[in-house]
Structure formats: C-alpha cells, structure tokens
C-alpha cells in the first residue's frame, strides 16, 4: 500500500497536455477534497488541495494520514519534479525526471451539453469512464484553463473543475472552489535546504528499513 501511494504521487502526474491552445495562467487553484458515498452525492470533507503556477512551475499541496502534508514542485519546461514530505521526523525531497506519457489513456469522455459553474468558471460535463472501473463519473471541466497544471484525467480538453478518483479508502471527489489570478514570486516554487534530496528507490529503502526496525 505504501509503494502504491508513493507511486501515485510520483508517477501519476506525467506530462501529456499541450500548452499551445490555452492562455497562460498565473495564480492559485483551490480544490475541496471529499470522501463520497456510493451515490457519489454525500461527501465527508478530507482536506484542501492547492495548486500554484506561473505557467512554467507548478506547486501542488496535498495531505494524507500516512505522510501528512506533501508538496510536489514541477518544472514544466525541464520535465522534472520534487515530492517534498516528512517521514520519521526527517524531511525528504524525492526527485524524479518526467517523460511524456505515450500510453493510451485509461479514461474515456462523453461530452454533454450541460454546464455548471465552479469558482465562477463555466464548466462542461463529460461522462467519464475509467478502465477496469465498473461505473461512470460526472466530470466537469473548464476550457479556459490548461489541464497541464493539474495533470490528471489524461485526454480531457480543459482543467477539471469537479472530478472523482478511486482510492484505497473509497472514492474521492475534487471540487474547484477558488481561482486566484495573481503573480507569484519565484520563492513559491523553492524548498529549503533542510530537505534531503533523494531518489525514489533510496526513499523506499529507508521506509523499508525503518519498518523492519520497528
């Protein structure tokens, strides 16, 4: 389960979106994350996910019970990223080189002429099927903002504003609740020297050895 969780954080966001058809966006996107029931309607709040970007760098802040707050800092031009987290009271910056995703998408989208607004962004409905998942989800997306900043749901034509993802604990619903268009300082995409730069393989070794000792 640990390896699956880290793999999702590191290898889930592989660069695939085209940037040419969207206006550059600089600012912050805030999502509310909920664990939903089988009807996909009633949700229990989990945390907020925040995405900051200057159209070249992207900083995504998430949370989990196992590792607490995790931060992913991604350079879209250099195709590399760092996952920042704290484990066993030590700070790690797990580095990874990103490669274009050339595999077929596991998502299929059936677009509908139905629209809603999320954070004042007009969003279109796309009924979403996921490979090996027996049910469909209602996904809304905005064609105004590039999906590469979120980099999820490969093949969608704009930034997802409400979407669902299966997880080990159940189905999570992500809803865009705030869009702030503002300039960001370069320091927003840096991390302090008290983080140890490490490869994914070496980090897994540390976690494995720690578990053996305990």
Image (cartoon, helix red, strand yellow):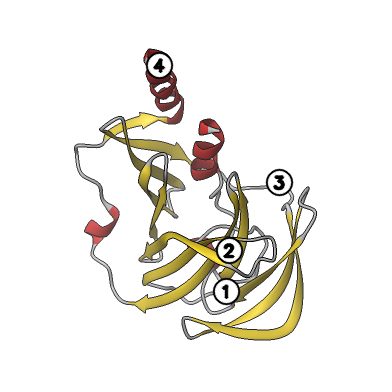
Q: Give the numbered dot on residue 92.
A: none
Label 3 environment density (alpha carbons within 10 Å; few <14, some 14–19, many ≥20): few
Give the distance between the C-alpha atoms of the residues marked 2 and 3, in whole angstroms: 16 Å
Give the distance between the C-alpha atoms of the residues marked 4 and 1, in whole angstroms: 47 Å
Q: Nearer the viewer, residue 214 or 31?
A: 214
Q: Would residue 193 be found to the left or right of residue 41 on screen?
A: left
Give the distance between the C-alpha atoms of the residues marked 1 and 3, in whole angstroms: 22 Å
Label 1 environment density (alpha carbons within 10 Å; few <14, some 14–19, many ≥20): few
Q: In this view, does 68 lie above or below 32?
A: above
Q: Residue at x 53, y 31 (%)?
A: 3
Quadrant for the N terminus, please: top right
Identify the residue under disc 2.
Answer: 18
Question: Which of the two labelled residues, at mark 4 and mark 2, occupies the earlier sequence position?
Answer: 2
Tell me the SS state at disc 2.
loop
Q: Nearer the viewer, mark 2 or mark 3?
A: 3
Q: Is residue 19 visible?
A: no
Q: Residue at x 38, y 40 (%)?
A: 67
Rendering coords of residue 49 (x, y %): 42, 61
Q: Do the residues labelled 1 and 2 touch (CB within 8 Å)?
A: yes
Identify the residue under disc 4.
Answer: 209
Q: Residue at x 35, y 66 (%)?
A: 54
Tell me the SS state at disc 4.
helix
Q: In this view, does 23 lie above or below 40?
A: below
Q: Give the numbered dot on residue 21.
A: 1
Question: Which of the two labelled residues, at mark 1 and mark 3, occupies the earlier sequence position?
Answer: 1
Question: Which of the two labelled residues, at mark 3 and mark 4, occupies the earlier sequence position?
Answer: 3
């Amino acid at each position: 389960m640990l390896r699956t969780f880290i793999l999702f954080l590191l290898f889930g966001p592989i660069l695939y979106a085209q940037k040419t058809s969207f206006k550059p966006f600089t600012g912050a996107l805030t999502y509310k994350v909920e664990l939903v029931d089988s009807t996909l309607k009633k949700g229990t709040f989990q945390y907020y996910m925040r995405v900051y970007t200057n159209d070249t760098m992207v900083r995504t802040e998430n949370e989990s019970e196992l590792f607490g707050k995790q931060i992913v800092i991604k350079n879209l031009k250099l195709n590399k990223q760092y996952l920042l987290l704290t484990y066993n009271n030590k700070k790690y910056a797990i580095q990874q080189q990103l490669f274009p995703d050339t595999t077929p998408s596991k998502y299929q989208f059936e677009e509908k002429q139905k629209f809603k607004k999320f954070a004042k962004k007009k969003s279109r409905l796309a009924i979403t099927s996921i490979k090996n998942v027996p049910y469909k989800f209602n996904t809304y997306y905005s064609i105004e903002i590039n999906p590469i900043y979120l980099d999820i749901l490969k093949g969608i034509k704009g930034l997802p504003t409400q979407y669902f993802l299966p997880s080990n604990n159940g189905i999570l619903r992500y809803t865009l609740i705030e869009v702030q268009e503002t300039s960001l300082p370069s320091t927003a995409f840096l991390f302090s020297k008290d983080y140890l730069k490490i490869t994914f393989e070496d980090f897994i070794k540390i976690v494995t050895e720690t578990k053996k000792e305990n």
